[in-house]
Image (spheres, rainbow, N blue to C red):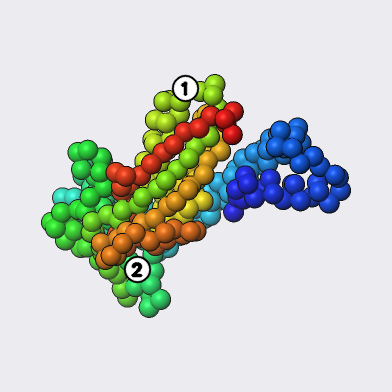
Amino acid sequence: MARTIEQIKESITESLKATFTLSTSAAAEWRLWVHCVAYAIYMFELVLDAFKAEMDADAEKEVAGTLTWYNDKCYEFQMGHELVFDTVTGLLEYEQADEAARVIKIASVNVAEDGTIFFRVATKDEEGKVVPITSNQLLNFKNYIDAIKFAGTKSTVISTDADEVRYQLTVYHNPANPVETVRLNVLSALEEFKTSQKFGGVIYRHKMLEAVTSVNGVVTAKLVSLARKGTEDADFIDIDTISYLHAGYYNYTEDSTLTLISINDI
């Protein structure tokens, strides 16, 4: 797992202090070089993480019955279509792909200690907001899962109101990039992160930060606070590292804040 830029900078600084006497000035040139090297190492570690994740995903995708396979099957569900037996794969499949009938837009799959597989699914409304599927869609999806799952597999399907996630985010940007462009791109990255992660109903603090720092014009970022609240929670719960989502997916609260600061103003 990739370290944060601050963690890498701290590691480099400690190594330097063990060998050299460093200036304590906040404007010391060595600090700039440490930041540049740390950023390069950080990007390299992100590439390694992405490569490993891609290799792991490809390896699992080939095997029917894995959680990744079940997750992909959620997105393949087609409302109003009948499954047919595929003599080549030996599995139930749809004769033709119909994107308009694929109502599942968000899915997370995980397994409980007793072996029960939990499917948490949702769709999107006309405004792009994540919402539960209808009762009719839920019934048909349950029948679909019962049909494709392996014999003896216990399963539970959940489609409920999304968890709420509230963030306070500070982004340090390159002043060469228009601030409003960076803001819109960061918000877009947050939306993409919300809907594209196949994390089994889990939100990772560091992955959210990685999604933000990958935006063009963003030098670094700090998640001042991150918290979630499910339908069964009385209040928001701080997310220090990871948090399990009751619904399996979430929406951002309207009082989440994004602050942009030029890297030159630090």
Residue 38 at x, y percent in the picture: 68, 41
Q: Earlier in the sequence, mark 1 or mark 2?
A: 2
Q: Residue at x 28, y 65 (%)?
A: 234
* Viewer-proximal residue among 161 and 147: 161
Could you tell me which secondary element the residue under label 1 belongs to? loop
Quarter of the picture containing the C terminus is: top right
Specify the quadrant of the image occupied by residue 259: top left
Q: Is 29 placed left or right of 141 in the picture? A: right
Can residue 183 be seen by looking at this rendering?
A: yes
Q: Residue at x 45, y 43 (%)?
A: 169
Q: Residues within 10 Å of mark 1 (few under 14, many from 20)?
A: few
Quarter of the picture containing the N terminus is: bottom right
Which amino acid is tagged 2? Ile
Q: Is 75 placed left or right of 137 in the picture? A: right
Q: Can you say whether 189 is above or below 202 in the image?
A: above
Determine which residue is flagged by label 2.
117
Could you tell me which secondary element the residue under label 2 belongs to? strand
Task: For marks 1 and 2, give the one nearer the viewer.
Answer: 1
* Viewer-proximal residue among 87 and 258: 258
Determine which residue is flagged by label 1.
178
* Viewer-proximal residue among 77 and 156: 156
Q: Residues within 10 Å of mark 2 (few under 14, many from 20)?
A: some
Residue 123 at x, y percent in the picture: 24, 48
Residues at marks 1 and 2, CA–CA distance in whole angstroms: 46 Å
Q: Residue at x 62, y 50 (%)?
A: 3
| Label ID, residue 227 | none
Specify the quadrant of the image occupied by residue 115: bottom left
Residue 154 at x, y percent in the picture: 31, 73
Which amino acid is tagged 1? Pro
Can residue 218 be seen by looking at this rendering?
A: no
Q: Is 207 placed left or right of 30 in the picture? A: left
Residue 250 at x, y percent in the picture: 32, 52
